[in-house]
Image (cartoon, rainbow, N blue to C red):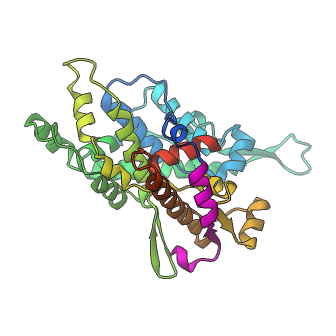
Amino acid sequence: FLQTQNHVKIDEDALEHWASSVDIARIVATPPQVFPLRFADALEEANFHCTLHLLNFGSGWRNLLHEHCDCGAWNTILRGLTGLHVTGRQLTAAGYLGVRLTDISSLFRIPIDLEEPILDSGGAVTMTKGHPLRPLAQNILDVLHQTGAILETRRINSLAEFVLFSGYPSELVQKMRDDGKFQQTPLKLQECVFELVQTFPAFRDQIRIDGREVYIFKKAQILVSELARVFGAKEPDDASDPLTQEVKTRLSFSPEEIDQMTIFSDNVIPAMLRHFGILKLSDKLTSKIANCQPLLRGKRETALRAAAIVAVDQIVASIRSKHPDTKLNAVILDLYLWSVAK
């Protein structure tokens, strides 16, 4: 796909220069984001991370969010989920279906209504109109309801259970867990990603352009990667905490599986690669971005995200060729680039 597009190109010389000069130790040592929250058990914590990445969208609303909510898309979603969690809302299929638009507005702090004075009333009479951010709030609600409905249809209690137990109905999962069929069986990373993409439209990050399907799958990959990172570092509190050990075992992906993942390409990563001179944009696309014009889903937006994936794969390959013992992969480099950008 990328070879047929003229909106963005990879500058091979700039890429090699950056790969040769960057501080690899600093990249590998980039600390992950930590959420200072209490969870009842490992499954509740896994559901928090699953829901966070289910709703990991909204960058197109960035300017309006900063204007009206004092933060961007990521922090808006994180704030809302934290609000749902601390108010005791269950991030399960039933919990998703029970959320209302007013909950999204209050907990995510996204305004949905706007009072405007009626002309010639001197401000004494107003009419209620939909706020410009209302469609974002509605989109969040729609994704929660759609995902909850799919989980209920499949008789699965939560998104985390879907991921951890390969899409089996919850009552069958319990029987299989009682029989010990899950505890010592690691998941296959690629199968996890494909199951998410095939089952839930919110994870179906693909588009058809010029008769060709382009697959990016950012959210599905980052969800699985984040679960593996969080629980891979955990140790059960004691012998009475089998659930944490079970989740940890299920998410024990091999280094080779992690290495197969691409960078989680969104709006941030292409912007950083452009900042480093690695991505070169056409004059038309450069002008559009400089003038803060929306970059709608389509050829240009997809070309930017695809170019970022290819460029990062080349960066990792270049660094590994010079430093074969490095632990660097696209997942680690994504964390570094994202943290530098923020």
Q: Give the residue furthest to the bottom.
A: 211
- Residue 77: x and y, percent? 55, 41
Residue 135, visible in the rendered structure: no
Residue at the image point whose x is 54% and y is 51% from the top: 57
10 in magenta: yes
Q: Nearer the viewer, residue 167 or 335?
A: 335
Residue 237, visible in the rendered structure: yes
Q: Nearer the viewer, residue 315 or 78?
A: 315
Q: Is residue 280 left or right of residue 27?
A: right
- Residue 142: x and y, percent? 48, 52
Q: Nearer the viewer, residue 199 or 19?
A: 19
Q: Is residue 301 above or below residue 54?
A: below
| The C terminus, quarter of image | top right
Q: Is residue 43 above or below residue 129?
A: above
- Residue 296: x and y, percent? 63, 65
The stretch of residues the image draws in magenta is 1-21
- Residue 90: x and y, percent? 39, 33
Residue at the image point whose x is 80% and y is 46% from the top: 116
Residue at the image point whose x is 30% and y is 56% from the top: 190
Q: Main secondary structure of the magenta part?
A: helix
Q: Is residue 81 left or right of residue 121?
A: left
Q: Is residue 61 left or right of residue 47?
A: right
